[in-house]
Image (cartoon, rainbow, N blue to C red):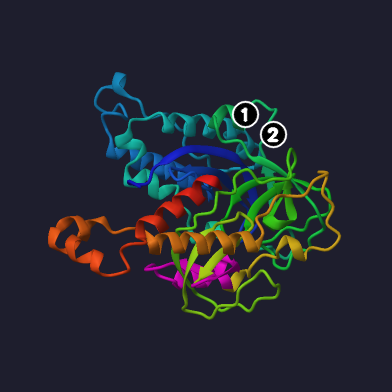
Amino acid sequence: MGDPFIRHIALLGFEKRFVPSQHYVYMFLVKWQDLSEKLVYRRFTEIYEFHKTLKQMFPIEAGDITPENRIIPHLPAPRWFDGQRVAESRQGTLSEYCSALMSLPVKISRCPHFLNFFKVRPDDLKLPADSQVKKPETYLMARDGKNNIADITGPIILQTYRAIASYEKNSRSEMTLATGDVVDVVEKNENGWWFCQMKTKRGWVPASYLEPLDSPDESEDPEPNYEGEPYVTIKSYTALLEDEVSLEQGETIEVIHKLLDGWWVVRKEDITGYFPSMYLQKAGQDVAEAQSKIKSRGAPPRRSSIHNAHSIHQRSRKRISQDAYRRNSVRFLQQRQRQPRPGPQRAGNPLQKEQPKTERPKPQPAVYNCIKTRKYLE
């Protein structure tokens, strides 16, 4: 995969907070090399300290030795008093600053100081606390204004989705939806919870409640991988529907289809079924971080469990049936078990002479050809 690096940085707007005292933070959408998009919040004073350290690390590029060699962009120092008008006026400056940062040489734009500053911090995942008097206020940059996000970030364009049913939030980090609400998706988490924004509201929403405006099919859903990826269950789950599978904590399974709604198709021996991806962790990785996320938010609801869902599309989303998953999975496992083993047979000629005496090697070519023919006809 290579070392991580940042592809784009987009300024979405700023937020006015009142705890512990009134201050402003800027919202950045950071797109990484694996195409994941993360939302981070930074004060202007933090950004300026990052800027000063960057200049100290690269004095030549900062123009400290020869002013003509400066390529690191300028950034004005913080003022003694920062009000809302100042926060608004800085947006254009910060947008240009981020754009200039991404055009710097790799030794600067991929240095640890640069990457660490834009990594997600624990505070970025927490919603700001409400004061007893006022709630945080969010101000998003207008797309048709002077500071157009599309002009700043290039290929980063937030996707628009529509709510197929009403959803009532269960925690402060979630967002309430009404049927027909149109939202912009900031981050698509593989656990099925998507971070969305609608006007000045934002929060986590179950992906199963959203549908693309142009098509009922989610084009980003990957194809099934019947070879399977090894995962470990970090929490037990009891199946509620026939096409789901019950598993205990600590079981090793194989994931054969990762769906964006957070319900993956898993295989346990010859059994397949849906299982919440939030309760899975890649084999060999630390499960402590994944288990901590479960405490704050459980598995999202499945689309089949949503009542009074209303889609604007005439045809429903295409889904592979569980019988097709099971049939194709068993077929793949059988083919893998019956694959010929040319290595040992070709390595020693005496073995090849003795094999015809047994009945087992004779039908191997016929079975193999049959499998190839059946695969070709399908």
In depth, the one of 184 and 375 nearer the eye is 375
Tell me the element at label 1. loop
Return the residue at label 1. 147
| 329 sits left or right of 21 in the view | left
Point out the residue furthest to the top here: 68
Identify the residue shown where x is 54% and y is 32%: 153
Identify the residue shown where x is 29% and y is 36%: 107
Whether tag 1 and tag 2 are in contact, CB under 8 A, the answer is yes
Residue 279 forms part of the magenta stretch: yes
Residue 335 forms part of the magenta stretch: no
Task: Point out residue 138 in the picture as x, y percentages from the top left corner.
Answer: 68, 48
Q: Is residue 280 above or below residue 86?
A: below
Q: Quadrant of residue 257?
A: bottom right
Q: Is residue 271 above or below residue 141?
A: below
Q: Is residue 361 above or below residue 155?
A: below
The magenta-colored residue range is: 269-294
In depth, the one of 163 and 252 nearer the eye is 252
Task: Point out residue 228 in the picture as x, y percentages from the top left corner.
Answer: 46, 60
Whole-number angstrom distance, CA of label 1 to CA of label 2: 7 Å
Q: Quadrant of residue 277?
A: bottom right
| 29 sits left or right of 132 in the view | left
